[in-house]
């Protein structure tokens, strides 16, 4: 395969707070190839949104990208090097703030947020906002930009786009607003669109329509997507490859079919098991015990060991880095769990440990009690 | 046949809701709804109510969970609040343990509240951030004068443990808890006055899946232990399928289908239920995705469609008796009519439109003439005239528009009752409650209203 469109290597983003350093994203690596929809899944607090903001360098104080590299189409969005006095400083070829603003954001990489009402300004017309965006980013004059804006509205399935061009965001339904944001993201024909939980606030029926539309548009424009979500059903429906995040790390990475049918990490299996199914009646749900620990003080060893039903003594000591576990000829499938032979740290010989997951229902729960958050 | 009790009339039910309506004023203020006319008396006043809940009947038996599902804006939450009498019903009655809540007020109503509690969607905003968790749980007991101070504290601690929290957390503030734990505090508070009935309004939709499962399991355990009855509202059909005994599907202020869980999921008898089920994504990449999605938006509850409210989006609208089109031709007419109404195309050339909408099956006879007329209007850019012809002569003639459906049919799975508000069921119904008067203004007398078949 050719060079990936976007490549993220060992990205670390930390927030320096009074209580200590929050390692929101702690060394994640993944690629996005051309024309591919890559999923980024995890519970809230896993670091999904921080990861995507980091890609656009939108992390604000007290947060900071402290390490790693982000390459996009051969250009360096982020990269550090060691200077002569041993300090880390940005590399020379790293894009400046102005280049990011003028060339990358919106034009090359667009982003769609979860809440369409907050992303649109309520006091300007929908068409006006779309037109302005096109005018600025594509150097068209006002009339041409308007023409283009109406075309884009039609493209995303807004009925009677000419009339609706002059309406305000509150006159649009939630699904329509999200369509407008998708139109805005597509308007500059970026190579990559980051979609941050774009359908979470919508009804299933509307969600279905939007996903259908995104699939069609993706084929037509050959845009790549990073699809951030917590919903495994959406992942199953739309993604080509998936990265599963837990507490700032990517713990499993695979093609979508392998992820569901050849799950390699206990967290991914637990996540899949905990969901009620629409197509069959499940008598008892098997939830993941406990809550995700704080990123400020992550557990030693494997970060999931405190909730893992398969945890053993060794999991407390060894911190696994994701490794490729695929067999010859198969697509890349990495997972960070020492139970696989590839890690060879003596998992089989290690005694199982008592975790919340192995205890009774309430016992495990009360232990973490108020410590969460 | 016996009285048609849509969906059922069981005198032993804990809660019986009969023809419950809740309308809201769309505008308020002195000049609300006043419009200027050009004729005497020059001003007119029209009120447009939002009919959030519009004639709902159901029973909840003791110890069961009734799931209530529907898209956002269909009136689920308004229904819940009206049932608990947090909102005053516009019409209808709610019998709780035999007493009509709609007619109660003041102290007697406050006393009744002890037996009915509610859990809200957002665990964050339903807890006072300045109160400690213990006092939060004690608050309802205080309001109802239960126990003394020591007794309340002991009970609060006991309840915290019951819902899966540490009693030691009695002195913590809500911000120290995660979302799932806060929802547990809400549960403990609801349970504190030992209620019989709890309305749960989307209690898990703000939680992560893994936490969702924990809370759902706890709710089920508590139901068993305290013999609780739940009205469980959710938009997520997977959650509903997991927790409910019976399920009611709501659309635009009406209940369109109500049946036992298995029956409803395996054997849905309303096109809307079918569409909702088809729209749920399955967490399985090999499932082939969702099929047959609904198109269009939910109509406004200010001026809901006559007859069956789902008919403007229904894929199975029934052909008016006066036409004799093939099924395909009728479907084409319907999709064309909806496209015109929505202005979803800009083409005006009749031949191109025929190719696009009527490929293969063109209606003949009267219907064909009407269609030619509509296409002619579109060619001359007279969209409204075209829309009028299509709507008045086709859509409004269907039995779906002229009478409001209400049928009870036999369940295939289990022996529960199965209520379906769809005219497609008129032939298999064991009881009907089709009320022609309910078909609002658009109904034309005698236009194909079905007969009760008994």
Image (tube, rainbow, N blue to C red):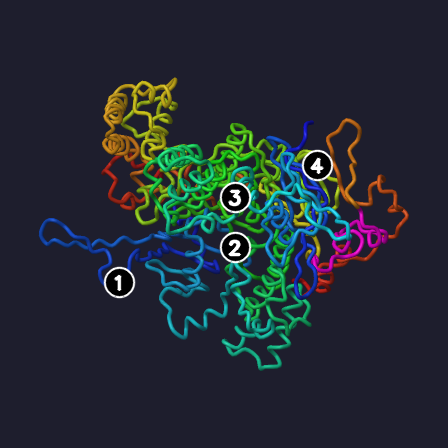
Q: Which residue is mark 4?
A: A254
Quarter of the image for the N terminus of chain A: give it. Answer: top right
Q: Quote the CA–CA distance across marks 3 and 4.
A: 24 Å
Circle nearer the N terminus (3, 4): 3
Query: Which chain does tag 1 point to?
Result: B
Residue at x 50% of width, y 60% of height:
B199
Label 1 close to label 2 by CB (< 8 Å): no
Q: Nearer the viewer, mark 3 or mark 2?
A: 3
**Residue contact between numbered discs 1 and 4, judged by CB atoms under 8 Å:** no
| Near-viewer residue (A63 or B365) | A63
Q: CA distance from mark 1 to mark 3?
A: 39 Å
Note whether A114 is above or below B175 in the view shown: above
Camera-near label (1 vs 4) is 4
Chain letter of the residue beneath label 3 in the structure image: A
Tell me where residue B438 appears, x and y as whole percent: 29, 46
The chain identifier of the residue carrying mark 2 reads: B
Q: Provide residue A249's location: percent of width, then percent of height.
A: 71, 48
Question: Can residue B410 be spotted in the picture?
Answer: no
Eye-nearest disc, 1 or 3? 3
Rendered residue at 64%/68% (across/down): B160
The numbered mark 4 sits on a residue in which chain?
A
Estimate the x, y position of residue B426 in percent, counting from the top left: 38, 36
Q: Secondary structure at mark 3?
A: strand
Mark identifier at residue B29:
1
């Amino acid at each position: 395969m050719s060079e990936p469109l976007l490549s993220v290597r060992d990205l670390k983003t930390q927030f320096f707070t009074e209580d200590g350093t929050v390692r929101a994203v702690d060394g994640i690596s993944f690629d996005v190839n051309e024309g591919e929809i890559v999923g980024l899944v995890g519970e809230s607090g896993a670091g999904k949104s921080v990861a995507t903001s980091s890609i656009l360098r939108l992390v604000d104080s007290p947060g900071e990208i402290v390490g790693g590299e982000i390459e996009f189409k051969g250009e360096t969005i982020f990269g550090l090097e060691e200077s002569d006095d041993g300090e880390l400083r940005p590399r020379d070829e790293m894009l400046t703030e102005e280049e990011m603003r003028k060339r990358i954001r919106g034009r090359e990489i667009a982003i769609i947020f979860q809440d369409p009402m907050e992303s649109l300004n309520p006091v300007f017309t929908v068409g006006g906002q779309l037109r302005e965006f096109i005018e600025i980013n594509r150097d068209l004059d006002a009339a041409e930009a308007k023409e283009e804006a109406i075309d884009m509205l039609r493209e995303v399935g807004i009925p009677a786009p000419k009339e609706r061009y002059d309406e305000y965001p509150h006159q649009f339904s939630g699904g329509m607003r999200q369509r407008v944001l998708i139109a805005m993201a597509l308007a500059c024909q970026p190579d990559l669109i980051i979609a941050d939980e774009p359908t979470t606030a919508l009804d299933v029926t509307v969600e279905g329509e939007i996903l259908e539309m995104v699939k069609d548009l993706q084929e037509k424009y050959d845009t790549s997507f990073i699809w951030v979500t917590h919903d495994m059903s959406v992942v199953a429906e739309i993604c080509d490859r998936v990265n599963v995040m837990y507490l700032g790390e990517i713990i499993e990475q695979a093609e979508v079919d392998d992820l569901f049918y050849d799950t390699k990490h206990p967290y991914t299996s637990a996540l899949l098991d905990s969901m009620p199914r629409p197509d069959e009646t499940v008598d008892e749900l098997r939830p993941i015990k406990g809550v995700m620990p704080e990123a400020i003080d992550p557990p030693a060893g494997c970060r999931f060991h405190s909730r893992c039903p398969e945890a053993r003594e060794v999991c407390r000591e060894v911190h696994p880095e994701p490794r490729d576990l695929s067999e010859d000829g198969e697509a890349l499938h990495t997972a960070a769990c020492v139970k696989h032979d590839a890690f060879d740290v003596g998992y089989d010989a290690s005694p199982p440990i008592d975790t919340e997951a192995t205890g009774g229902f309430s016992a495990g729960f009360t232990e973490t009690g108020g410590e969460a958050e | 046949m016996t009285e048609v009790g849509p969906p059922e009339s069981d005198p032993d039910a804990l809660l019986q809701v009969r023809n419950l309506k809740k309308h809201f004023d769309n505008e308020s203020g002195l000049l609300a709804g006043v419009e200027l006319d050009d004729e005497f008396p020059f001003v007119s006043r029209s009120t447009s109510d939002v009919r959030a809940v519009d004639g709902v009947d159901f029973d909840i038996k003791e110890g069961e969970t009734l799931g209530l599902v529907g898209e956002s804006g269909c009136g689920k939450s308004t229904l819940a609040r009206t049932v608990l009498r947090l909102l005053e019903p516009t019409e209808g009655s709610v019998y709780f343990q035999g007493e009509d809540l709609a007619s109660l007020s003041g102290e007697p109503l406050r006393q009744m509240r002890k037996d009915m509690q509610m859990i809200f969607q957002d665990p964050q905003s339903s807890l006072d951030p300045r109160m400690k968790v213990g006092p939060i749980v004690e608050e309802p007991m205080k309001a109802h004068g239960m126990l003394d101070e020591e007794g309340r504290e002991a009970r609060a601690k006991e309840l915290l443990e019951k819902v899966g929290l540490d009693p030691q957390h009695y002195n913590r503030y809500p911000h120290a808890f995660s979302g799932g734990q806060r929802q547990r505090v809400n549960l403990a508070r609801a349970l504190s006055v030992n209620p019989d009935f709890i309305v749960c309004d989307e209690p898990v939709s703000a939680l992560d899946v893994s936490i969702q499962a924990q809370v759902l399991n706890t709710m089920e355990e508590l139901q068993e232990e305290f013999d609780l009855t739940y009205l469980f509202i959710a938009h997520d059909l997977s959650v509903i399928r997991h927790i409910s005994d019976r399920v009611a599907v709501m659309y635009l202020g009406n209940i369109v289908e109500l049946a036992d869980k298995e029956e409803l999921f395996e054997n849905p008898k309303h096109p809307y239920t079918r569409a909702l089920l088809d729209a749920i994504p399955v967490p399985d990449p090999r499932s082939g995705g969702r099929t047959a999605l609904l198109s269009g938006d939910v109509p406004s509850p200010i001026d809901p469609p006559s007859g069956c409210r789902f008919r403007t989006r229904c894929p199975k609208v029934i052909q008016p008796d006066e036409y004799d089109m093939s099924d395909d031709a009728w479907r084409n007419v319907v999709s064309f009519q909806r496209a015109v109404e929505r202005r979803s195309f800009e083409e005006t050339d009749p031949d191109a439109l025929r190719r696009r909408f009527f490929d293969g099956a063109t209606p003949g006879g009267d219907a064909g003439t009407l269609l030619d007329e509509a296409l002619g209007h579109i060619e001359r850019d007279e969209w409204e005239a075209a829309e009028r012809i299509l709507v008045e002569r086709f859509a409004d003639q269907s039995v779906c528009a002229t009478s409001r459906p209400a049928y009870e049919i036999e369940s295939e799975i289990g022996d529960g009752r199965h209520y379906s508000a769809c005219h497609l069921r008129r032939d298999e119904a064991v009881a009907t409650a089709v009320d022609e008067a309910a078909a609002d203004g658009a109904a034309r007398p005698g236009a194909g209203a079905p007969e009760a078949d008994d």
